Image (cartoon, rainbow, N blue to C red):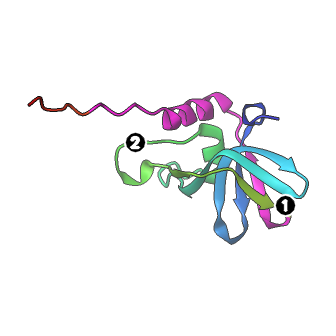
Amino acid sequence: MTASDTKWSIVIAEHGFVFAGRISREADMIVIREGYNVRRWSLVHKDGLGGLAKRGPQEKVGGADNDIMDPITTTRIHVLAMVGIFECPNVEVWDTWHASKTTTTPPTPKKTKKK
């Protein structure tokens, strides 16, 4: 199973850790691929993590309207350390947002001075 075969979900783990990504289960572990640590979700929408799951990440300039999500490498969480899962029904929004975060612009080559 590849990461693109799995749906986007938000995973709540012990000690207040919240992750978003494509999840699968391997034995006693929940595996999060193409994931993010959800550091803060929008305070303006007042819809909590369930709202984040439905609407997808929001990024507006400044203020409490931004969802802050930091990229993570493939992460494994034991099923006993997991508190809950929100499925993200709007996969297209999450895919588009993720693609915007993983697309990089190649560096511009430095010009060298001729002698």
Q: Position of residue 29 (x, y in %)?
A: 84, 57
Seen from this angle, which residue lies furthest left? Answer: 115
Q: Amino acid at mark 2?
A: Lys
Determine contact: label 1, label 2, CB under 8 Å.
Answer: no
Q: Quadrant of the C terminus?
A: top left
The image position of residue 9, as x and y in percent, is 72, 44
Q: Amino acid at mark 1?
A: Val
Magenta span has 52? no
Q: Position of residue 80 (x, y in %)?
A: 85, 66
Residue 9 shown left or right of residue 43 in the figure: right
Q: Which residue is mark 2?
A: 60
Q: Which residue is found at the position 40% from the left and 42% from the top?
A: 60
Along the horizontal axis of the image, is 55 left or right of 24? left
Q: Nearer the viewer, mark 1 or mark 2?
A: 1
Disc 2 crowd, CA 10 A, few/some/many (<14, 14-19, 20+): few
Residue underneath mark 1:
79
The verdict on residue 81 being magenta is yes
Labels in figure, total: 2
Horizontal and vertical percent position of residue 16:
65, 67
Q: Quadrant of the N terminus?
A: top right
Task: Determine whether the residue tagged by mark 2 lies in a helix, strand or loop.
Answer: loop
